[in-house]
Image (tube, rainbow, N blue to C red):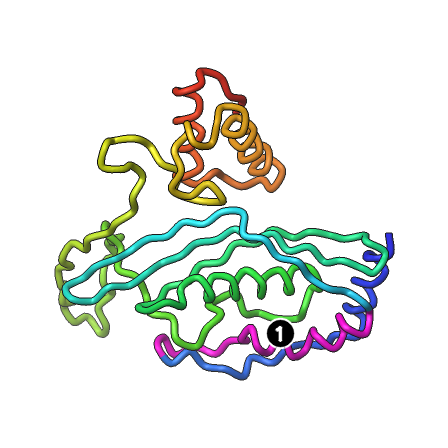
């Protein structure tokens, strides 16, 4: 297929991408999605390669601490790199974004695209952190405790963390299960239909096996609900 040759041609002409940006919130240097687009676009255009993306899974969370609200979005995105003969390769990557306004989804999309570029073209880079220079952290409902390290034998000061309210809806007010991710977000199993629900459950299981990754809690809950409602599903 022509796409294999074109991918190799892009790799041959694409150099390293410098880590010239700095995250102002956490203080580390990184390569932004703009740097990847600016470097890769000329090579893709010259080689006749274009990209089609599709979000295949989405999980959204709202975190509240005092009067501060933050939004967290986690995506699985399918990227298809096409050549002009119709041949393509696809890369599925995950992205996560946190924001206090409306940019959590775009940050997650940027992260997923960034890693699709890195993994497809083996771009020389050591950056595996956030895609944006400003990425506020999310307080966990059950923060992991770490023993503080004292310096010069001084006694460490331990501060207690107040619990944080986390909202992630899986049921409606009437107690009916609703899907919390993907293209069926917010729908009940009755709305999806038995055939489609079973097929999607099988797809999730097969895809996780293919990628050698564990299913997430939302995916496991979906498969459990399908199994209980329709009595049979592989996985």
Residue nearer the viewer, 119 or 183: 183
Q: Which residues are magenta?
A: 25-47
Q: Residue at x 64, y 55 (%)?
A: 79
Q: Is residue 185 left or right of residue 127?
A: left
Q: Residue at x 54, y 52 (%)?
A: 55
Callout count: 1
Instruction: Please tell me which residue lies in front, 228 or 196.
Output: 196
Q: Residue placed at 25% from the left, 49% from the top? A: 167
Where is residue 87 shown, x and y percent of the image? 81, 52
In the image, 1: left or right of 217?
A: right
Compared with 154, 212 (above or below) is: above
Residue 11 on the magenta segment: no
Q: Is residue 140 above or below residue 102?
A: above
- Main SS category, magenta section: helix
Residue in view at x 63 percent, y 74 percent? 37
Vertical side of 107 occupied by 22: above or below? below
Residue ID for mark 1: 36
Left or right: 146 in relation to 31 = left
Q: Quadrant of residue 206?
A: top right
In the orientation shown, which residue stands out farthest toward the top? 231
Mark 1 neighbour class, 10 Å CA radius: few under 14, some 14 to 19, many 20 or more = some
């Amino acid at each position: 297929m022509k796409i294999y040759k074109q991918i190799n041609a892009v790799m041959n002409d694409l150099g390293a991408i410098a880590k010239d940006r700095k995250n102002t919130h956490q203080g580390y240097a990184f390569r932004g999605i703009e740097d990847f687009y600016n470097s890769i676009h000329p090579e893709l255009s010259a080689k006749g390669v274009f990209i089609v993306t599709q979000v295949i899974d989405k999980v959204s969370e709202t975190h509240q601490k005092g009067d501060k609200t933050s939004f967290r979005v986690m995506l699985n995105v399918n990227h298809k790199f096409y050549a002009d003969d119709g041949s393509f390769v696809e890369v599925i990557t995950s992205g996560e974004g946190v924001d206090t306004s409306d940019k959590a989804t775009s940050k997650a999309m940027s992260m997923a695209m960034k890693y699709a570029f890195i993994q497809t073209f083996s771009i020389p880079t050591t950056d595996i952190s956030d895609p944006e220079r400003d990425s506020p952290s999310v307080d966990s409902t059950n923060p992991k405790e770490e023993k503080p390290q004292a310096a010069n034998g001084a006694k460490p000061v331990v501060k207690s963390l107040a619990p944080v309210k986390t909202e992630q809806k899986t049921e409606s007010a009437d107690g009916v299960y609703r899907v919390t991710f993907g293209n069926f977000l917010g729908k009940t199993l009755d709305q999806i239909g038995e055939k489609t629900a079973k097929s999607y459950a099988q797809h999730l299981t097969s895809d996780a096996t293919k990628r050698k990754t564990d299913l997430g809690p939302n995916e496991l809950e979906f498969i459990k609900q399908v199994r209980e409602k329709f009595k049979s599903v592989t996985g």
